[in-house]
Amino acid sequence: MTSDAAIDTAALEHRRRLSLRAAATALIAAVICWPLGMSIGGGSETADTIGGAFLLTAVVGLIAAPWIVRAWQGFMRRRMLVAAVAGRSDIRHIDGENANESQAVLSSDAFNLSAFRESGLVEAFETAGVHHVLTGTAQGVPFGITEIALLDAKGYRIFGGVLASFRLNRIRPGLTIVARDRGLLGNLLARVGSGIEQLPLEDPTFEGVFEVYGDDQVAGRVVLTTTMLERLKALDDLGHARGFACAFAGGHLLVAFRGMQWQCPPWRIVQPVDTWLDGYARWLSGLVDLPVGIVQTLNLAVPAVDHAASSASAARAAVPVGSGSGQVFSAPLWRIIGEGGMALMYTASGAVFGGVALVGAWYGLTQGYSSNLFWYFWGMIVAGVAYGAYAIALGVRELARLAWRWNAPLRALKRP
């Protein structure tokens, strides 16, 4: 770390202590005031007022304590990135709030966000919310790495994590995808309906670690040597993400870490910053250096200009990019509610009306209806059963469509 980073570390430590004290004070106030508020009151109006004030203080403390920790995490995310790259001239940090600069990097020759639409690494998306971007040229390899949320046309988040792109020296034939092995059933569900083929691994050591897909078996075997798989395993281990996948596509090595966050975990607030910030910087550097090593393993030294690859990148339309902050209702839970909620309502209403109609039909068959109401009741029963069947079928269809799209990017790849 440079001297500037050391100064920043001292300032960060001061902020950590202030935040820890504030959060602890709020939590202690909640722990003390809640039993006091419960014990005071019931005797007079004054006692009830005092007891209510204690209870209100406890509620405020319970809300404030995690909020303070969360605010500290947001503060630290930006400062940690700045401090972590301070000692590296080959990495530049861009805050996601700077939408114009983020857009320029994510539609550049090193990193074209729209290339991920065609990679089989993420579901099809329409817009993106960027938290932070790291970009530069490491050992001659142009790259871009971003912590990002990808949103569909309705604004629901379909991917949250880190995407990375590393520029190769020439366009490679075919598409080769390496993803974590999901087991026999999981692998089958991941590729069903896809036009891409499963490629066998030559090294049995990695058969339980990775699953490989591609549209060119020869190109896939050339890329996925034992050394390459070892480096990919090291990158997967380094990521500590909920999902890892990469693709050798055209002139880029594309990497997706689903679930990765550059935000420090909340429990870091109890640890001095200087005990873990250097480790964070080394981890972040590894996210750059390991993929660069993969490029060099393939002997893909990047030339100064590659007209063919530049033309391919320029042909892609830029993805609209905004800030990742403020996306309160874009989490996967809201996607389930937004896209699946109406389908569940259809299913529930169909079950209710259809069930009532079937009960009425059972009563009519066993007890019978009076002659003057016979056609009225049976008409309502037929209408209820018809509506119930239609609503349930519509709801199940929409739920099936959502399940078919959910976290299944390989299905977007069709045979040429």
Image (spheres, rainbow, N blue to C red):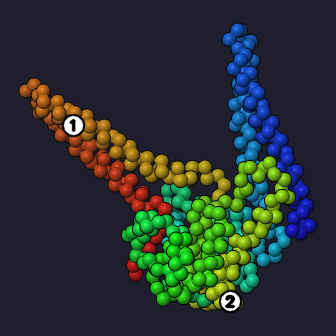
Residue 252 visible (yes or no): no
Quick one: 402 or 209, which is closer to the camera?
Answer: 209
Q: Quadrant of residue 53?
A: top right
Q: Quadrant of residue 206?
A: bottom right
Q: Secondary structure at mark 1?
A: helix
State the residue at coordinates (79%, 64%): 279
Quick one: 242 or 163, which is closer to the camera?
Answer: 242
Callout 1 amino acid: Leu
Residue 230 visible (yes or no): yes
State the residue at coordinates (62%, 73%): 233
Residue 223 at what x, y percent from top left?
Answer: 56, 85
Callout 2 amino acid: Ala
**In the figure, is residue 45 to the left or right of 395?**
right
Quarter that holds the N terminus: bottom right
The answer to whether residue 248 is above or below residue 259 is below
Q: How many marks?
A: 2
Quick one: 34 or 355, which is closer to the camera?
Answer: 34
Residue 296 at what x, y percent from top left?
Answer: 68, 86
Quick one: 300 or 372, which is closer to the camera?
Answer: 300
Q: Earlier in the sequence, mark 2 or mark 1?
A: 2
Question: Which residue in the structure is indicated by mark 2?
Answer: 301
State the residue at coordinates (31%, 37%): 352
Task: Kindly give the residue lying farthest to the left in the view shown.
Answer: 371
Dot 1, crowdedness within 10 Å: few (<14), some or many (≥20)? some
The answer to whether residue 291 is above or below residue 59 is below
Task: Kindly give the residue lying farthest to the top in the view shown.
Answer: 43
**In the figure, is residue 185 to the left or right of 100?**
left
The answer to whether residue 341 is above or below residue 257 is above
Question: Which residue in the structure is indicated by mark 1?
Answer: 358
Dot 2, crowdedness within 10 Å: few (<14), some or many (≥20)? some
Q: Secondary structure at mark 2?
A: loop
